[in-house]
């Protein structure tokens, strides 16, 4: 749903939020309100010249003339002006001048627009005590044009015969039925279909992986069902093509039939392309879909309401959504878009600006979940020129002020229903310019929701796997991290440095994603009946993807310096050749890391025992990678109902389940009871994978989880030996095989989404990904594999990596073409189904066995072990690589053979389906 709303973000700009933000701060004065009412009257009267009577003596009459022409269009049937912000006007005495931001809403019949203006007004001297104001200057800031008040036309009823409405992978048929339309001046833009007979819908996505998701949802890879009614939105320019004239006959309207259509129309019209204008208008105003786009609300008995959308603004432009269950069934790029080679998720290439540094000063009141913040955002403009920019900040937080050194105080608008604020720069800013914005804000903000179902591409790794029950007896903690928008941030997250000053009252403490400054925390004495508190200063000198902090009661149980050894081989440099140079190349080697262990009070013993293990894990990964991206690490042990963790940069949070909590946990894909260090090893690995190396889109999230999971297995190998290592891999392999049909690794957060089962996500994104990495290692050998891992790491350090970057690094080191391997294992679902048989070829010396491996269904590339069992009881393992649908191997024999088996080590996720 989040994505679905995102598609319509641009239509949801709304204004009452801004009213909330500003109105409370600046109670309007009567005289100002009277002036705005006069402007409204002038607009409704349609007399631009009357605007000139409202001017102050100092106003530039030429500019005012131009503005009045823009303000006051002919035929305005209704005008509403609302004040959104007020500040003192420069060059006036206090109380004698205001700079206002106003929103001007005008209706002309069924058409409307909203324009945001800056109005400078001055008080004029009067004989009476009357408070009177005049316009001294005005500037138009932003506008939303083309709002339509839609209504179904009761006078036009069509009888449709053999009407077929098509969009990509969708067909809506109406053999016989009624069609009603809603018009705007350009033509019909909405329609309701009511079948008399033969109303059917058919949806069959072109991509195979999407058909698999439809099969999981509907039991068949094609949704084909009767519908009761369909509501459609489209561009008027597409009407003739979508509704061919020969399929429609106009007939005399029937009131009863119209009423049924109108009920559907009223129910559905506001769900998309809609605007809620709050105090500007109570009517439902709607924007026009771009040409080629289509939206269908398909009401069926079987699936209730299915929403199909083709939205050219989205990288993945086709989607099918189940409204009742709020599930994305399909989301993918249309065939024409794929054929045109339009890159997906190249959002970084067209970002309007890039944040360089955050300075975040926040004081928290944990009992109220309240914060007061001041953030300085230093950014660099990347677009040619911008006159406004969008920042992300939680919707529940109120912006108190925004200012910048160059522009002074700035005006900001909230986007309704979203965590976005639009900042109006009072002029154009060109590429390369650096701006610092200072934003003060406050409000109530909920910590990271532990609900797995809110998971999205931005969802933190490994957030709580189950919610804490209200009766949870552990120490409470509040996590503010990615996805909560607790500080103003870029809408396209990138890597930045940061400083944070965080204040909490007694008895709370904070850990955060940065180095704790020397002398920190400082005790802040209580005042005004406020309790005393602690002020913490953190600095993230290395680039981080997002800022996080965790508030709880902590005891510091250990501080140590871990010495790190650089391996001889060093880091390979450079990523794939197609990418621009990495702005943060792996260079200087940190030869020490400061480790702090902070725990909830009851976890001190566990904390002391964990500290040396955490140090060992860090030293091991550093040796493996030749780099430690962050010079500090705080390990926080907090009490939670279930095991799990979360790892922002500089910080690893581990849940310590309480004895009562973990009843259903044992059967989870991420439960490894015989490896107690698993969570620690996995979370610490996220400093390299997920933090230092990010991921580009949800399709690439496996890079973070798969490498972290594989590194956790490598640490098991190092600390506890081969037996545990192979046992872990075998279990991951089993999960990969059992859940493989649920979808490909590249489906990311969508794995298990339709089923509502997060174990599927962990089975595939954690475990199958790790198994895939181990298969690569088996195919190319240890040395080449680890060179490939380092090449990928070095080329992707402090940037967002994609699956192609992983493949390119391994291809470069191994000289092997890996396209088919990645297509099968990362982009494809399922696992190999093989037939195995062998015969003895006695005609050669020494004798050989001929082993034949044949794949049913999809053909994969994979390594597998063949085990030869001799009559004398000995066995011999032979590593093989299968690259074809049918592969034949001649295995030299050392004696009489009893049997030859495939995959006895259980390390390849395959199924033997016959001989
Ligand atoms: Zn993880």
Image (spheres, rainbow, N blue to C red):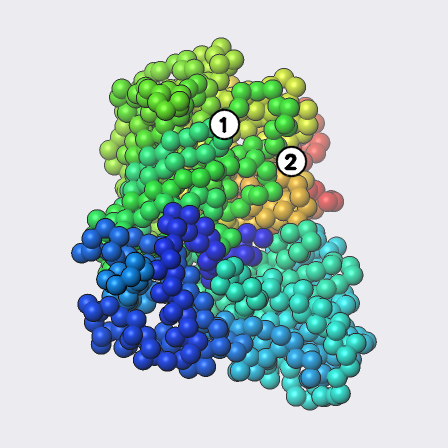
* Residue at x 66% of width, y 19% of height: 660
- Residue 786 at x, y = what percent? 40, 36
Residue at mark 2: 734
**Mark 1 burial class by Cα count in 10 Å: few <14, some 14-19, many 20+:** few
Residue 367 bears which disc, if any? 1
- Residue 225 at x, y = what percent? 76, 65
Q: Regarding mark 2 in the picture, which secondary structure is present there?
A: helix
Q: Is residue 223 visible?
A: yes
Residue 88 bears which disc, if any? none
Q: Is residue 687 visible?
A: no
Q: Is residue 522 left or right of residue 728?
A: left
327, 725: nearer the viewer: 327
Mark nearer the N terminus (1 vs 2)? 1
Q: Is residue 764 left or right of residue 48?
A: right
Q: Regarding mark 1 in the picture, which secondary structure is present there?
A: loop
The answer to the question of whether label 1 and label 2 lie on touching residues, with beta carbons closer than 8 A, is no
* Residue at x 38% of width, y 42% of height: 441
In this view, the mark in front (1 or 2): 1
Give the alpha-carbon distance from disc 1 to disc 2, as whole Å.
45 Å
855, 715: nearer the viewer: 715
Quadrant of image for the C terminus = top right
From this view, report whether residue 493 is shown above or below residue 638: below
- Residue 147 at x, y = what percent? 50, 71
* Residue at x 63% of width, y 17% of height: 659
Residue extending farthest to the top is 605
């Amino acid at each position: 749903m989040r994505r679905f709303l995102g598609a319509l973000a641009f239509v949801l700009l709304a204004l009452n939020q801004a009213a909330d933000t500003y109105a409370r701060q600046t109670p309007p004065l009567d005289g100002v309100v009277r002036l705005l009412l006069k402007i409204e009257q002038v607009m409704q009267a349609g007399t631009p010249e009357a605007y000139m009577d409202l001017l102050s003596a100092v106003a530039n009459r030429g500019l005012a003339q131009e503005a009045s022409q823009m303000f006051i269009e002919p035929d305005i049937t209704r005008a509403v002006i609302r004040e959104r912000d007020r500040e003192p006007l420069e060059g006036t005495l206090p109380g004698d001048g205001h700079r206002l931001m106003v929103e001007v809403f005008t209706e002309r019949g069924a058409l409307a627009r909203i324009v945001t203006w800056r109005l400078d007004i001055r008080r004029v001297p009067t004989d009476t005590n009357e408070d009177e104001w005049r316009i001294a200057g005005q500037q138009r800031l932003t506008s939303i044009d083309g709002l339509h008040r839609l209504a179904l036309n009761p006078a036009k009823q069509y009888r449709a015969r053999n009407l077929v409405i098509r969009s990509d992978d969708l067909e809506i048929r109406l053999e016989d039925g009624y069609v009603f339309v809603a018009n705007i001046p350009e033509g019909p833009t909405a329609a309701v279909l009511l079948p008399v007979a033969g109303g059917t819908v058919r949806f069959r996505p072109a991509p195979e992986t999407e058909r698999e998701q439809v099969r999981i949802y509907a039991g068949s890879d094609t949704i084909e069902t009767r519908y009761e009614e369909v509501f459609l939105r489209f561009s008027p320019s597409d009407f003739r093509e979508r509704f061919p004239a020969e399929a429609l006959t106009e007939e005399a309207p029937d009131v009863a039939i119209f009423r049924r259509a109108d009920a559907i129309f009223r129910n559905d019209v506001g769900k998309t392309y809609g605007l809620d204008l709050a105090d500007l208008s109570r009517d439902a105003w709607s924007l026009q879909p771009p040409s080629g786009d289509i939206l269908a609300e398909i009401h069926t008995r079987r699936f209730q309401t299915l929403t199909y959308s083709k939205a050219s603004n989205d990288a993945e432009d086709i989607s099918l959504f189940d409204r009742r269950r709020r599930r994305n069934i399909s989301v993918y790029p249309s065939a024409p878009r794929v054929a045109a080679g339009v890159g997906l998720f190249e959002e970084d290439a067209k970002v309007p600006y890039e944040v360089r540094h955050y300075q975040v000063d926040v004081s928290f009141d944990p009992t109220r979940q309240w914060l007061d913040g001041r953030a300085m955002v230093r950014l660099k403009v990347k677009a040619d020129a911008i006159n406004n920019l969008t920042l992300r900040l939680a919707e529940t937080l109120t912006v108190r002020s925004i200012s910048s050194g160059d522009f002074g105080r700035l005006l900001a608008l909230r986007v309704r229903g979203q965590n976005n604020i639009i900042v109006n720069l009072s002029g154009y800013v060109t590429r390369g310019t650096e701006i610092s914005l200072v934003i003060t804000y406050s409000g109530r903000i909920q910590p990271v929701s532990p609900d797995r179902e809110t998971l999205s591409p931005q969802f933190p790794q490994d957030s709580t796997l189950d919610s804490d029950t209200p009766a949870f007896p552990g120490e409470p903690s509040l996590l503010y991290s990615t996805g909560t928008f607790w500080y103003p941030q870029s809408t396209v997250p990138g890597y930045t440095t940061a400083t944070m000053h965080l204040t909490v009252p007694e008895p709370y403490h904070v850990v955060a994603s940065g180095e704790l400054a020397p002398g920190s925390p400082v005790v802040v004495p209580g005042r005004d009946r406020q309790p005393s508190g602690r002020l913490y200063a953190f600095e993230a000198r290395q680039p981080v993807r997002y800022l996080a902090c965790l508030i709880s009661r902590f005891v510091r149980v250990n501080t140590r310096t871990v010495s790190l050894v650089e391996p001889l081989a060093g880091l390979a440099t450079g990523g794939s050749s197609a990418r621009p140079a990495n702005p943060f190349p792996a260079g200087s080697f940190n030869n020490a890391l400061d480790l702090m262990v902070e725990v909830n009070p009851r976890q001190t013993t566990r904390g002391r025992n964990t500290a040396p293990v955490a140090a060992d894990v860090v030293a091991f990964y550093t040796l493996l990678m030749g780099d430690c991206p962050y010079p500090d690490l705080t390990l926080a042990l907090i009490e939670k109902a279930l095991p799990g963790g979360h790892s922002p940069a500089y910080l690893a949070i581990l849940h310590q389940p309480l004895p009562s909590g973990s009843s259903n946990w044992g059967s989870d894909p991420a439960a490894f009871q015989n490896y107690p260090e698993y969570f620690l090893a996995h979370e610490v690995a996220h400093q390299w994978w997920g933090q230092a190396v990010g991921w580009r889109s949800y399709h690439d999230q496996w890079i973070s989880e798969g490498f972290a999971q594989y590194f956790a297995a490598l640490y098991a190998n190092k600390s506890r030996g081969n037996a545990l290592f192979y046992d872990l891999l075998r279990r991951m392999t089993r999960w990969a095989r059992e859940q493989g049909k649920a979808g490909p690794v590249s489906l990311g957060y969508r794995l298990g989404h339709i089923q509502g089962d997060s174990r599927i996500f962990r089975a595939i994104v954690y475990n199958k990904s790790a198994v895939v990495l181990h298969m690569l290692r088996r195919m190319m050998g240890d040395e080449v594999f680890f060179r490939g891992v380092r090449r990928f790491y070095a080329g992707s350090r402090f940037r967002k990596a994609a699956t192609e970057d992983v493949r390119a690094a391994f291809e470069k080191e191994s000289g092997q073409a890996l396209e088919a391997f990645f297509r099968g294992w990362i982009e494809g679902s399922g696992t190999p189904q093989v037939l195995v048989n062998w015969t003895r070829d006695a005609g050669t010396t020494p004798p050989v066995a001929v082993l034949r491996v044949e794949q049913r269904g999809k053909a994969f590339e994979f390594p597998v072990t063949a085990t030869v069992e001799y009559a004398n009881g000995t066995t011999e393992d032979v590593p093989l690589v299968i690259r074809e649908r049918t592969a034949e191997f001649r295995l030299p024999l050392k004696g009489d053979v009893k049997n030859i088996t495939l995959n006895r080590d259980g390390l390849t996720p395959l199924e033997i389906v016959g001989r």
